[in-house]
């Protein structure tokens, strides 16, 4: 929430949000093996699989386009193609290469975000595996793991964690 005066929701007490966060973290601490282990393994496998498969796919596509370009040039130099057809075909190939480069850049950006999520999940896992149940709210833990808070209703709040997931928790009003 960037500006609480512009929020159309009815008033939600700060201490209720803090209590809900403490309860959520205690649940994560208690059940981190059931919740965070599969998430961690899934992110790790997905990043490893996507990295090797996608890089290979980009290389194959790039090589195929370059091979078409080479063949086009050979045909043009043997006078099998007119200047007009050659120019249009080369423009199409250049556009394909630019599109492929943009797709690869987008993929790498998403891959970096996946690495960030994996790192944040590992950090949360390490904290929950070593932590004990808390009776009171801890501001430092909140700042360390929470990216945002979503108020779903007067009795339900969501905590958007740095690892990319949003966990809902009931509030005691």
Image: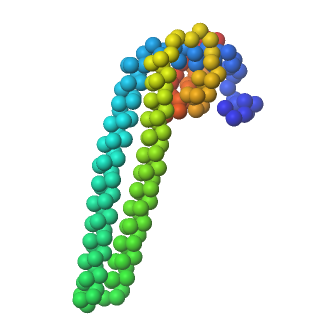
| Point 39% across, 61% down: residue | 100
Is residue 81 visible in the rendered image? The answer is no
Q: Name which residue lies at 36% across and 36% down.
A: 44
Picture quadrant of residue 64: bottom left
Q: Is residue 143 above or below residue 24?
A: below
Left or right, 11 with respect to 146, comes to right
Locate the C terminus and report the quarter of the image it occupies.
Answer: top right
The x, y position of residue 117, in whole percent, is 47, 36
The residue at the far top in this view is 135
Position of residue 92 in the picture relative to residue 157 (left or right): left
In terms of depth relative to the viewer, which is nearer, 149 or 10? 149
Q: Residue at x 41, y 57 (%)?
A: 103
Tell me the quarter of the picture where residue 139 sits.
top right
Q: Position of residue 72 (x, y in %)?
A: 28, 79
Q: Is residue 141 visible?
A: yes
Which residue is nearer to you in this view: 71 or 124?
A: 124
Quadrant of the image occupied by residue 125: top left
Q: Residue furthest right?
A: 5
Query: 73 or 84: nearer the eye?
Result: 73
Question: What residue do we see at 34% from left, 77% from top?
Answer: 89
Colour scheme: rainbow
Q: Position of residue 122 (x, y in %)?
A: 45, 29
Locate the N terminus by quadrant.
top right
Q: Position of residue 76 (x, y in %)?
A: 28, 86
For residue 121, side relative to residue 53 (left or right): right
Q: Nearer the viewer, residue 100 or 48?
A: 48
- Relative to 100, residue 70 above or below: below
In this rendering, the answer to whether 59 lies above or below 139 is: below
Q: How many marks?
A: 0
């Amino acid at each position: 929430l960037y500006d609480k005066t512009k929020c159309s929701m009815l008033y939600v007490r700060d201490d209720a949000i803090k209590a809900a966060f403490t309860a959520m973290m205690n649940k994560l601490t208690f059940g981190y093996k059931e919740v965070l282990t599969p998430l961690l393994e899934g992110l790790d496998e997905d990043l490893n699989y996507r990295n090797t498969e996608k890089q290979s796919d980009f290389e194959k596509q790039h090589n195929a386009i370059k091979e078409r370009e080479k063949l086009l040039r050979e045909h043009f130099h043997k006078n099998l193609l007119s200047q007009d057809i050659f120019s249009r075909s080369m423009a199409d190939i250049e556009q394909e290469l630019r599109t492929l480069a943009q797709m690869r850049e987008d993929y790498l950006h998403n891959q970096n975000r996946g690495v960030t999520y994996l790192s944040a999940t590992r950090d949360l896992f390490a904290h929950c595996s070593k932590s004990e149940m808390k009776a009171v709210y801890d501001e430092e833990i909140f700042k360390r793991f929470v990216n945002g808070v979503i108020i779903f209703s007067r009795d339900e709040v969501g905590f958007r964690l740095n690892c990319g997931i949003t966990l809902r928790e009931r509030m005691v009003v």
